[in-house]
Image (spheres, coloured by chain):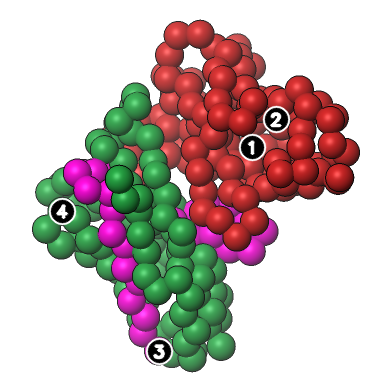
Amino acid sequence: GAGVSQSPSNKVTEKGKDVELRCDPISGHTALYWYRQSLGQGLEFLIYFQGNSAPDKSGLPSDRFSAERTGGSVSTLTIQRTQQEDSAVYLCASSLESGGGASGTQYFGPGTRLLVL
Amino acid sequence: AQSVSQHNHHVILSEAASLELGCNYSYGGTVNLFWYVQYPGQHLQLLLKYFSGDPLVKGIKGFEAEFIKSKFSFNLRKPSVQWSDTAEYFCAVNAGGKNYGQNFVFGPGTRLSVLP
């Protein structure tokens, strides 16, 4: 079946502009995650959605970052008033369920490479 | 909060050499453990995972990992690497709990370069 997809694959924007990044999880997956991967760095957790529960936003670096998940499927990560330090690859992952075990295994999308000039 | 450390930032090997990438985590409870691989220009892929049972886990492409609970370690091994194994390898730990998102923690990654 189809994997996690993300769009756009690349985004170049000017400092101060807003950007929206989209994630389509695997069909039927209830859990969705956003991560940020900066050059030479590991994955930095941003936000987590599980079903209809309130999202875990504890990883968002500032109030310029927000995310939504509509209808329990597609998610949009929005960065307002972008800064140069926001340049990174933004990764989305989904899992069948949260929690441990096989159903908690995350499957990743190809990422969106964001460059803020 | 739990953390994951990977011993080596960059490992360079010749083809046919044996590989061991270290991974340690800090969490005293039950954990699920993962190794992900990111080949150049590709997205993260699951290499192998441990949930319970036999602590020696076999994954794709001849990789294996051993969970040693007493050492809080989950080292990745391959007896004979190939040029195509050149990639970035990430260890990850899922400790579950209330704040689930934060409890799925990735290590900083180890870049493996295999020389032909």
Q: Is residue A113 above or below residue A103?
A: below
Magenta-drawn segment = A17-44
Mark 4 vs mark 1, CA separation in Å = 33 Å
Looking at this view, is A66 or B66 the one in front?
Answer: B66
Q: Amino acid at mark 1?
A: Ser
Name the residue that disc number 4 marks. A72
The quadrant of the rendering that contains the C terminus of chain B is top right
Look at mark 3 in the image and give the residue it sits on.
A17
CB atoms of marks 3 and 4 within 8 Å: no
Q: Position of residue B56 (x, y in %)?
A: 58, 13
Circle 3: residue type: Lys
Place residue A78 in its image quadrant: bottom left
On whether disc 3 and disc 4 are found on a single subunit, the reply is: yes
How far is mark 3 from mark 4, CA to CA?
28 Å
Q: Residue at the location (37% across, 64% down)?
A: A6
Q: Which chain gets the green colouring?
A: A
* Protein chain holding label 4: A
Callout 1 secondary element? strand
Asked whether, in this view, residue A83 is left or right of residue A59, the answer is right
Inspect the image, locate mark 4, and give the three-letter code of the amino acid beneath it.
Answer: Gly
Q: Estimate the x, y position of residue A54 in percent, counting from the top left.
A: 18, 51
User: Between A2 and A41, which is closer to the camera in this rendering?
Assistant: A2
Q: Looking at the picture, tell me which residue is in the foreground, A5 or B92.
A: A5
Is mark 4 in CB contact (under 8 Å) with mark 2? no
Question: Which residue is pictured at 28% across the width and 59% down the height?
Answer: A24
Q: Which residue is mark 1?
A: B5
- In percent of width and height, residue A93 lies at 37, 50
Q: How many neighbours does mark 1 have within 10 angstroms: few (below 14), some (14-19), or many (20 or more)?
A: some
For label 4, count other residues whose C-alpha is less than 10 Å away and answer few (under 14), some (14-19) or many (20+). Answer: some
Which residue is identified by label 2? B22
